[in-house]
Amino acid sequence: MLFLPAHLHIPDGFLSIGVSLIFWIAAIIMIALAISRTNQSLGEKQIPLMGVMAAFIFAAQMFNFPVAGGTSGHFLGGALAAIVLGPWAGILVMTAVIGVQALLFQDGGLLVMGANIFNMGILTAVIGFGLYRVVIHRNKGTRLAMAGIGAWISTMAAALITSLQLWLSSTSRLEVVIPAMMGVHALIGVGEALITVAAIAFINQTRPDLLGSEDTFTSGGRGWIAAGVFFSLLAVLVSPLASGNPDGLERVAKDLGFLEVGLAAPYQILPDYKIPYLGDTALSTILAGIVGALFVLGLLILLGRSIRRSNGT
Amino acid sequence: MHFDAFDRYHFRQSPIHNLDPRVKVLVTIAFILSNAILPNGSWSAFALAWLVLLLINDQSKLGLAFTVKRSFVALPFALVAISAIFSPLGEPLFEWNLGIITLIPTDYGVIRFLSILLRSWLSVQMAILLVATTQFPDLIHAFEHLRVPRILTSIVAFLYRYLFVLTDEVFRLLRARDARSAGLPGVKRGGSILWRAKITGSMAGQLFLRSYERSDRIYKAMISRGYRGHLRTLNPHEMNRPDWFILTISSFILILIQLVGWIR
């Protein structure tokens, strides 16, 4: 049908058991908090509301708009859900969406679902809502801009944490996976941001009462601002460090002592990803990353085309 | 669109279809877990796991090749993930000599790459079997029995119930957009990317409002019919002797697979 591969849904088998369990625990803690908070704030009305909103996010992921060369921008929805419904309800809605995608469509695995929920449901809600909450009392333009920035950063942060999980599971090497994932999602994130901003602008115009409702924002206090800003900064700071100087990050991980297996992987691709003639510089690593990202993007375009063709549209 | 447009259930009369959904959920999760903890390159254990899959395929009267066929439908998802990790594993198929970069495959890399693919492939097939032999409402009910919080299962139940309604809504919106943006062949139509994104965003906003208002009507309708905060079902779901039997047998088979995988 209209479901295109969503590149952040990790299938089973790609994460190690330890990484899967750690992120399941993190996800379960957040979900438990979300359940108790939404119980207090929304009451019995919450279930039909959140259920239909989950169906909305699911259906909205079918919207796409042509960008160029057969690719199309489309939509994950985590930041939008958190901004419009409040962060706790947003987390529950995204959990349900990711659960159904994994169960019904095998889009994302079951054992790694905790990681998928954390990446696409929780992190996006924390960043998207946290940043939006900073400017909640400002004028419309500022709020819309911040919603867009939040949507973009949350997509990038989800890509970053997905890369880190793949690296910790020694499924892929850091210096390849980070530039590739971040490169692709820098573009996807722009689409996400544009749609999020336009959707919020539309809702703001037709039903402004839904956006500023006290329900939403009493459940999301100042802690969200701190968490949102913290995680955005972390994402913004870690990604250049990780893509420009992966050795640094590996050393940090080694010093923390939780990473023997990930580093022991004895595969190598020409001397440590240096492009010849450029020598041992950060520039050469970044170039290698860009080449990797372009390769992935090309593959995605081909894949998208062949899927569309096989759909017979 | 029909209400089960998204359902992957295949109606058959088979022992697998008749199993308690809890058993099927537990065995599926245990099977995926077992794949995840098998060591790299334990080919005989992977083969054994695949034989188990074939057996269940056969027992469920879906045909031996049922899940294999469908697993390739899911393969693009795996490929996207693989392409993101394309080079470090040095699989020869991806060998890529562009003059600037040469890939050097190593035996460990190839073994690990194949093991990841196999784990993913086996796990996807088991998940496909689960939804092909269990109706989705039963599945939700099983998760409820397995202590998944009721709020979550209820949200999922609503999601399932209204997904096709909202999908119809999406199709109406898309059709309306197409009808308004007709153009001559060969002539560029539509505005800039920014403009297109704005239109798409407005459609998402429109869908949001329609969904929101619909959820309000649903809520009122349900309240007037005695809704008290959670959904009820008429399906009793009892664990009978065949259910316990299959659960025990499956545990032994999974332990056997682990033994084959770890003892060389």
Image (spheres, rainbow, N blue to C red):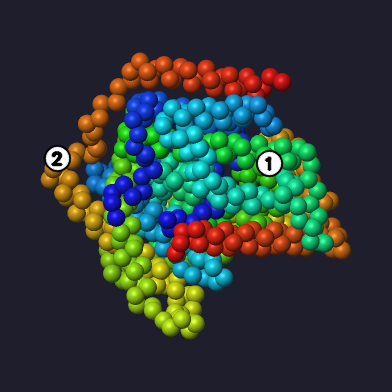
Residue B106, picture quadrant: top right
Image position of A116 (left or right of A99)? right
The amino acid type, in three-letter code, at marker 1 is Phe
Q: Position of residue A28 (x, y in %)?
A: 45, 37
Residue at 66% of width from left, 36% of height from top?
A: B115
Residue A256 visible to the viewer: no
In the image, taking residue B239 as reference, residue B101 lies left or right, namely: right
The 10 Å Cα crowd at callout 1, few under 14, some 14 to 19, many 20 or more, is: many
Please name the residue that numbered disc 2 is placed on. Answer: B226
In this rendering, the answer to whether A10 lies above or below B27 is below
Horizontal side of residue A77 vs B42, given as left or right = left
Q: Is residue B195 visible?
A: yes
Q: Using the image as rendered, state which of residue A36 and residue B128 is in the foreground.
A: B128
Mark 1 lies on residue: B113
B93 vs A283, nearest the viewer: B93
Amino acid type, mark 2: Gly
Q: Residue at x 48, y 84 (%)?
A: B187
Question: Looking at the image, which residue is at 55% across and 35% down?
Answer: B122
Q: How many marks?
A: 2
